[in-house]
Image (tube, rainbow, N blue to C red):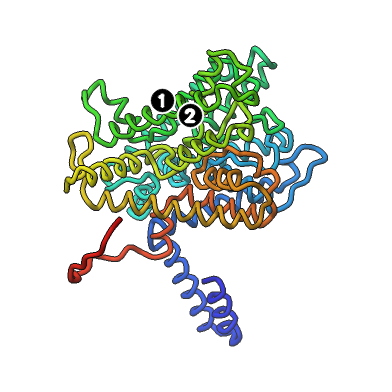
Amino acid sequence: MLFVLFFSLAGRLKGNTLSSIIEVAGLFKKVRGWFVSSPPRALTIGFIVIILIGTVLLKLPVSLREGQSIDWVDALFTSASATCVTGLVVLDTGTFFSTFGHWVILALVQIGGLGFMTMGTLFAIFLRRKVSLKERLILQESLNQNNLEGIIKLVLRVIYYALTIELAGSILFTLRFMLDMSPGKAIYFGIFHGVSIFNNAGFDLFGDYRSMANYISDPFVNLLSIVLIILGGLGFVVLADLVEYRRNRRLSLHSKVAIYTTLLLFIGGAVVILLFEYTNQKTFGPLNMADKIMASLLHSMTPRSAGISTIDVASLRQATQFLLVILMFIGVSPGSTGGGIKTTTFAVLIVAVLAVFRGRKDVVLLRHRIEPDRVYKAITVTLFSFIIVVVGTMLLSVTESHSFMVVLFEATSAFATVGLSAGLTPELTDIGKFIVIVLMFMGRLGPFTLFYAVGPRKGKTLYRHAEGKIIIG
């Protein structure tokens, strides 16, 4: 598209006439119309613009500590990781960037977590500007909603819930950090980690790529982190349902599935991690039983999209690392700050498989029949996501000289916007960094948004093909 625009401009400007200028203006209008003609495309372009702005800001000397320098590739990687709320870092956040750089990263995390259209709508409301239909459609796409009804009210609730939870988390972190550092630094660290963890970003300021290892035996920090991750990962629609439960005394099917699946994966993952790592002297071995349980719970929840850790992920046994890959791939719930194929998608796939095994035509979940198009969508999202992870893993296996498990772990972490690293990211080649950037970007937007951004959704066909039979299995 850009090459066509360039050559078209060159041909039209040769005459240097008024008609040529009018034609060029018309061409720009057509290109602009192509960009904003569909909400998924506008959403994709918007995220690219935010990432580029963040790249420029992080490249400024004021964003770096004295004596540090950063190239464009690393600035782009850091900006993409923050905007896509991933948390993978090629440069240590705490020791490399200045206070200004930290605030830039935190702003990108906030915009990426809530969505730039959500933030834009907030400013539009403050300025008393009417939100257009096209902007409402983009909001619908960014919040993964099925219709436009009440979309502005949902946006306001999203902002209110997010800021309230972030404020509460920041205050609680600040009170805890005051025991270890000065009040000013504690407030600074409290705000940064409260926002980062709720948005499932995984960035930290403790330095040396250690994440929150200093608090492995601290129940307050561990439990607070788990609660923030869960609240950020359930999705704002579920949070709204939970807030209104006292009045309505009911939860939607979506909320029930999201909550039940989250709890099942959380508890089941913690049990398996505890069993796998119980005797591993590099991770859980030296810990007492209470600390082992806390570490199991945190590392069962954090791969869902959060990216923080209290132990060295690279020292985990391969069986545990593969379990984390599965949890990362599943991810959190729709309409949340995290990635993955989503908990509801995973639940629909499981009940669809059970229906086939039982010889039933209908897919039933919590006494509700799931429409076939929802099942097809779940299969499509999972398969498309699987292909992206496989291709990303294959490409990184070519460009990086690490074991297959490490490469698979890093590729899945990038696509699921998790941010956990088995040690590969800081050692990535420039080509590897671009591959991971693409994986993070695709994971943040989601398969369907990317698909519809490239080509608009076509209407229903007016005919049906003859039925064919093939052997399956």
User: Where, by quadrant of the figure, is residue 247 drawn?
Assistant: top left
Please state which amino acid type lies under the numbered disc 2.
Ser
x and y percentages locating residue 92 in the rendered image: 70, 37
Q: Which residue is mark 1?
A: 267
Instruction: Please say whether residue 123 is visible from this viewpoint.
Output: no
User: Where, by quadrant of the figure, is residue 176 drawn?
Assistant: top right
Mark 2 Cα-neighbour bin, 10 Å: few <14, some 14–19, many ≥20: many
Please tell me which residue lies in front, 418 or 78.
418
x and y percentages locating residue 190 in the rendered image: 59, 23
Q: Which residue is mark 2?
A: 300
Please tell me which residue lies in front, 169 or 390.
390
Residue at far right of view: 67
Mark 2 vs mark 1: which is more N-terminal?
Answer: 1
User: Where, by quadrant of the figure, is residue 83 drawn?
Assistant: top right
In this rendering, position of residue 69 left or right of residue 216: right
x and y percentages locating residue 229 in the rendered image: 47, 29
Q: Quadrant of the C terminus?
A: bottom left
x and y percentages locating residue 109 in the rendered image: 55, 39
Secondary element at tag 2: helix
Residue at far bottom of view: 15
Please state which amino acid type lies under the numbered disc 1.
Ile
Labels 2 and 1 touching (C-beta < 8 A): yes
The residue depicted at 63 percent of the width and 17 percent of the height is 286
Secondary element at tag 1: helix
Total marks placed: 2
The residue depicted at 61 percent of the width and 27 percent of the height is 311
In this rendering, position of residue 361 left or right of residue 204: left
Instruction: Please say whether residue 408 is visible from this viewpoint.
Output: yes
Mark 1 Cα-neighbour bin, 10 Å: few <14, some 14–19, many ≥20: some
